[in-house]
Image: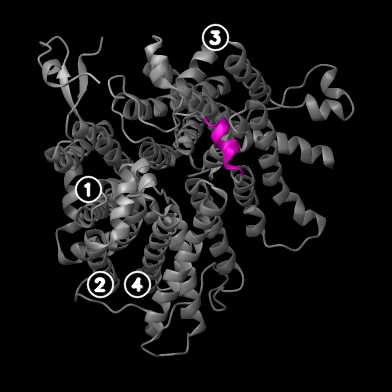
Amino acid sequence: MLILILTATVAASIPLVYAALGELVVEKSGVLNLGVEGMMVIGAVCAFMVAAETGLLWLAVLAGAVAGALMALIFAVLTLSLMANQVASGLALTIFGVGLSAFIGQAYTSVALDGLKGLSLPWLSSLPVVGKLLFSYDILAYGALLAFFGVSLFLYRSRAGLILRAVGESPHSAHALGYPVIRIRYFAVLFGGAMAGLGGAYLSVVYTPLWAENMTAGRGWIALALVVFATWRPGRVLLGALLFGGATIAQFHVQGLGVEIPSQFLTMLPYLATIVVLVIISRDANVIRLNAPASLGQVYHDDVH
Amino acid sequence: MRGFKLEPRLHPSRKMVYLSPLIAIGLTLLFGMAIFSLLGQSPVKAFHAFFIEPINDWYGLGELLIKASPLALIALGLSVGYRANIWNIGAEGQLTLGAIAAGGVALWLHDSDSHWVLPLMFVAGALGGMAWAAIPALLKTRFNTSEILVSLMLVYIANLLLSWLIHGPWRDPDGYGFPQSRLFSDAALLPNLLEGTRTHAGVLVTLLALGVALVFFRWSLLAFQMRVAGLAPRAAGYAGFNQHRMVWTGLLVGGAAAGMAGTSEVAGPIGQLLIPLSPGYGFAAIIVAFVGRLHPVGIVLASLLMALLYLGGESAQMQLALPAAVSGVFQGMLLFFLLAADVLIHFRVRLTGTKRLAAVIVPEH
């Protein structure tokens, strides 16, 4: 029973890990993209459509990532090339994404799909307890772990990561040193979009293999909150995602324990948890100020100081 | 190399402030036509079905007012906060809470035929919306928590709260088990304004709010301070403007407006509590606020345009068998193009390859 809850928690946290790691890189470059929910939901619908049409799950996942990146491209052109307000552009991306996904996905709402199955590793998966706990997931779940190591190493152990962080801290200094600030931010935003799209694809082809309008249900926003919770550090993203995954799973098990609570209040848990956690982290203004990229959310143009 | 370059203007262009919404509307129409063509529809027929058909009679114009009214009301409230960079994006949740509070009054006074039921509902609705908006305000001023994320999370919580009420304690005993409250009594329903349409008295609340907003923005010191804080946060800091008061004002006004919009919906076209209450008015109002330039008159015009997009979506669904979600696509596109066109306010476009004449006039920073 406990193992079942733990593995379900991990599965629920995977979409958040992808989306939040992507947004972490975006914010480290100094850009605030509030459109994660829109990119995720487009990733989810595109992945599902490709899976339903072709049956090729790897292609579906790829389609989700590409679709997320294309959405991010709209945001990038608006905010990086045309210097539009990042908050408004991100909101527009979410409104557009939710509408567009409902529009293009309408024909697929009642389609059934064989989702991605967990790997069955020889010997490892059949180990008692550990086998189920560590070696029973699908390949995308391990991909999330890989993404975590990749992003950590990139940000803190590579020259490119150092430059990206410099761009986020002080774009004008980075520009003066000869780094192409706009181009670097473009790459970061596109990467964030692809990761959000992957998170969405995980939802629609693995976690609950179906398409329903608005099926991301605020996970994109929770991913944004996770980045704040993590105070812009990858390790804490992983931890936070598990915490929220747990809040999502808890709703299914509280009633099993004989507690009489209407289901709606249990469904509120992840959203309530997000608010509570945000309060705890934001309470100390210094923590935020010290860790948030200094130029986060500010418009930048090479010619304007 | 790119084919053009953006050069900062010395002064923002006043002309472009008014022109860019028009450019955005034009581009949205153009792209919309292209999308219809891609879907195999005749663009002319689609245009007619989307933009002309819904409003070619009195009834249709009434529907336009019914949809524009909550959009304008919410956007007016939101614009107060947005002017000071206070980003309340949870109006949808505040609308729901307003509807719950007003609906509670209507159900509680179900047997009353007093004229005070409706005013009481509006007061309750405004307070409900304000209470929901007070949560992000409190957390922002006390704990420095992002009002964007908190107000958004509260949208989901509000919907679940409403769902619980109409599935549980407030479920209609004679409703055959459907998740909805009982129908409101006549005293709790807004009277009709125009014969032959469904236009209800809720529109008057919006007109009243419009007047209040015009006066507030024009003459109040607080509105001026909030405008300054939005345009030049540092200057506002030096001037010692009370940041907490701005956060509270911005969020509470937005919450009250959204709560009253929710009240108008349940006391007007819906007449009971059920899900869904609104086709995303709280989110669409964010676009209305921006397209309307955060100015009361602009907001009213933008709300009519957005209402037309809603009606067009419904009409496209009926006449062209297109999903109604197409209106969300149009709404998103409109905001994209507006944000893109806004670059022309502060920058001029110069094709690269031409003489660098402008460099003489525009000093390098």
- Is residue A228 or residue A192 the one in the foreground? A228
**Quarter of the image that includes the N terminus of chain A:** top right
Instruction: Kindly report the distance in space between the C-alpha atoms of the residues bearing marks 4 and 1.
Output: 25 Å
* Residue A67 picture location, percent across and down: 44, 26
Residue that label 2 marks: B204
Give the chain letter at badge 1.
B
Instruction: Kindly report the distance in space between the C-alpha atoms of the residues bearing marks 2 and 1.
Output: 27 Å
Label 2 secondary element: helix
Q: Is residue A91 magenta?
A: no
Residue that label 1 marks: B50
Instruction: Kindly report the distance in space between the C-alpha atoms of the residues bearing marks 3 and 1.
Output: 53 Å
**Quarter of the image that includes the C terminus of chain A:** top left
Residue that label 3 marks: A159
Q: Is residue A291 magenta?
A: yes
What span is in magenta?
A: A284-292
Q: Are marks 3 and 1 on the same chain?
A: no
Instruction: Kindly report the distance in space between the C-alpha atoms of the residues bearing marks 3 and 4.
Output: 61 Å
At x 38%, y 84%, the residue is B186
The reply to whether discs 4 and 2 touch (Cβ–Cβ < 8 Å) is: no
Label 3 secondary element: helix
Label placed on residue B245: none
Label 4 secondary element: helix
